Image (cartoon, grey):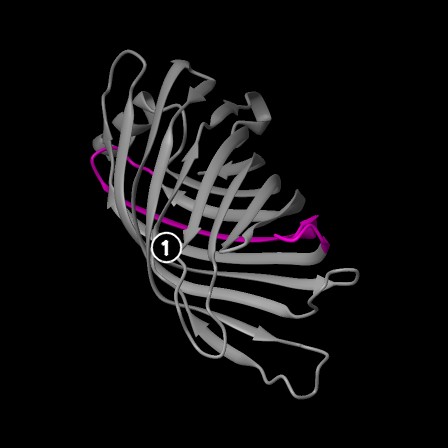
């Protein structure tokens, strides 16, 4: 009991933290071919929810899920107009350990390991020169950390970073209007991905002291290496995503 009370006295945020958030971000997607690069971009919108258990000198556990969708536009390597419906989903779990100082700004550092699954679907529409659906999916291991310090009892500022190590990745091509073109699944080369976050948290007071509001700007880089395959080769693909989460946290 004394250890529990000591935790409450030294940490402005309670250990169990549930959050839900609207999220929006800009995608810049580039595929490289021998004849040049096709590029697509636009803002997409979605919802992000999760749970973190962050308790001083204890094991850390975390889980989050994301779904987002929108329409991309751009140009092919030959200059043709591209238009597509894009959506993605992600689920991830993490375990680690929390290091936290008791005094001052109470810096908190949480290294972790994790496992996740991510799926992207990009369905090309007219006037795109080639009409089909591309679905990239993969499992991954992740290594990263959360960090936070408290310049004021109601405010927290942090830096979060993670890397993803892909495996079992594949791309399924389907929905070609040509009846002679069968659906196919092709391989892609595994590349390392990473994500940065800069969370800013404000804990409410009084009757709402179990709630907090947070804005989380982020940048995410995804890279899928080109890979020769049959009946198609997978073109090297790079994505630069940057945007914001606006989180509402419930803590106890």
Q: Nearer the viewer, residue 81 or 200?
A: 81
Q: Which residue is mark 1?
A: 93
Specify whether residue 35 is in view.
Answer: yes
Taking the image as shown, residue 13 lies to the left or right of residue 181, namely left
Residue 176 at x, y = what percent? Answer: 67, 77
Where is residue 29? Give x, y as percent.
56, 47
Mark 1 neighbour density, 10 Å: few (under 14) some (14–19) many (20 or more): many
Location of the N terminus by quadrant is top left
Q: Quadrant of residue 141?
A: bottom left
Q: Percent x, y for residue 90?
A: 49, 56
Q: Which region is colored magenta?
A: 54-82
Q: How many marks?
A: 1
Our reading of the magenta stretch's main secondary structure is: strand
In this picture, is 83 found above or below 188?
A: above
Between residue 130 and residue 111, name the one nearer to us. Answer: 130
Front position in the image: 49 or 59: 49
Q: Residue at x 30, y 21 (%)?
A: 10
Q: Indicate the position of residue 147 as horizontal and vertical percent values.
A: 33, 29
Task: Classify the position of the C terminus by image quarter.
Answer: top left
Left/right of residue 24 with respect to residue 166 in the rendered view: right
Res 21 seen here: no
């Amino acid at each position: 009991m004394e250890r529990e009370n000591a935790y409450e006295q030294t940490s402005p945020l309670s250990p169990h933290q549930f959050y839900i958030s609207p999220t929006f971000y800009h995608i810049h997607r580039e595929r490289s071919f021998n004849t040049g690069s096709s590029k697509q971009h636009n803002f997409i919108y979605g919802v992000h929810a999760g749970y973190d258990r962050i308790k001083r000198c204890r094991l850390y556990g975390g889980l989050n899920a994301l779904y987002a969708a929108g329409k991309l536009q751009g140009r092919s390597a030959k200059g043709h107009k591209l238009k597509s419906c894009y959506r993605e989903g992600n689920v991830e779990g993490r375990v680690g350990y929390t290091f936290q100082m008791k005094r001052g700004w109470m810096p908190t550092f949480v290294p972790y390991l994790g496992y996740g699954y991510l799926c992207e679907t990009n369905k090309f529409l007219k006037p795109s020169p080639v009409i089909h659906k591309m679905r990239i999916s993969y499992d991954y291991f992740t290594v990263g950390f959360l960090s936070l310090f408290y310049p004021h009892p109601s405010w927290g500022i942090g830096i979060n970073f993670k890397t993803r190590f892909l495996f079992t990745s594949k791309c399924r091509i389907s929905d070609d209007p040509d009846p002679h073109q069968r659906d196919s699944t092709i391989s892609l080369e595994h590349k390392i991905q990473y994500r940065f976050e800069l969370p800013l948290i404000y804990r409410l007071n009084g009757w709402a002291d179990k709630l907090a509001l947070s804005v989380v700007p982020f940048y995410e880089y995804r890279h899928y290496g080109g890979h020769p395959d049959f009946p198609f080769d997978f073109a090297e693909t790079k994505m630069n995503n940057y945007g914001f989460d606006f989180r509402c946290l419930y803590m106890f």
